[in-house]
Image (cartoon, helix red, strand yellow):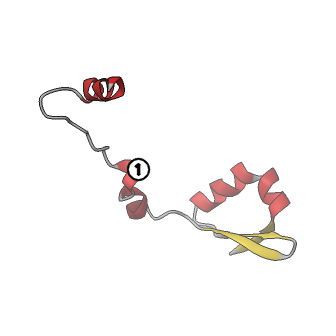
Amino acid sequence: MRTISFTEFRNKASLLLSEVEKGEMLIVMKHGKPIAKIIPADATEVKNNPWNKPALRLVVKGGGLSSAILEERDK
């Protein structure tokens, strides 16, 4: 585990994140206090996150959703 300053992280973020991708863990310090722990993402964790799943489809019986919204706006 490597400790770096916030300024170093800001200046070298791309390089440091490449190191994290290879397995390195980082602690980011600001004014001598730890503010972030950066660790490699677990592949199964990323795979199961909600943003990787298809979105819900909203349907109104008998017509399209957009036409139902437009009808409601007219009322």
Q: Which residue lies furthest to the left in this view?
A: 62
Quadrant housing residue 60: top left
Note whether 9 is above or below 59 in the view shown. Answer: below
Q: Identify the residue position indicated by label 1 in the image.
A: 51
Q: Which residue is drawn at 21% across and 36% down?
A: 59
Note whether 60 is above or below 46 in the view shown. Answer: above
Note whether 70 is above or below 42 in the view shown. Answer: above
Amino acid carrying label 1: it is: Trp
Location of residue 62 in the rendering, given as x and y in whole percent from the top left corner = 12, 29
Q: Which residue is drawn at 41% across and 63% down?
A: 45
Of the 4 image quadrants, the one containing the C terminus is top left
Location of residue 6 in the rendering, given as x and y in whole percent from the top left corner = 81, 62
Location of residue 18 in the rendering, given as x and y in whole percent from the top left corner = 64, 54
Q: For this view, does 60 lie left or right of residue 71? A: left
Q: For this view, does 37 lie left or right of residue 29? A: left
Quadrant housing residue 47: bottom left
Q: Which residue is drawn at 79% across and 54% down?
A: 10
Q: Which residue is drawn at 73% across and 71% down?
A: 35
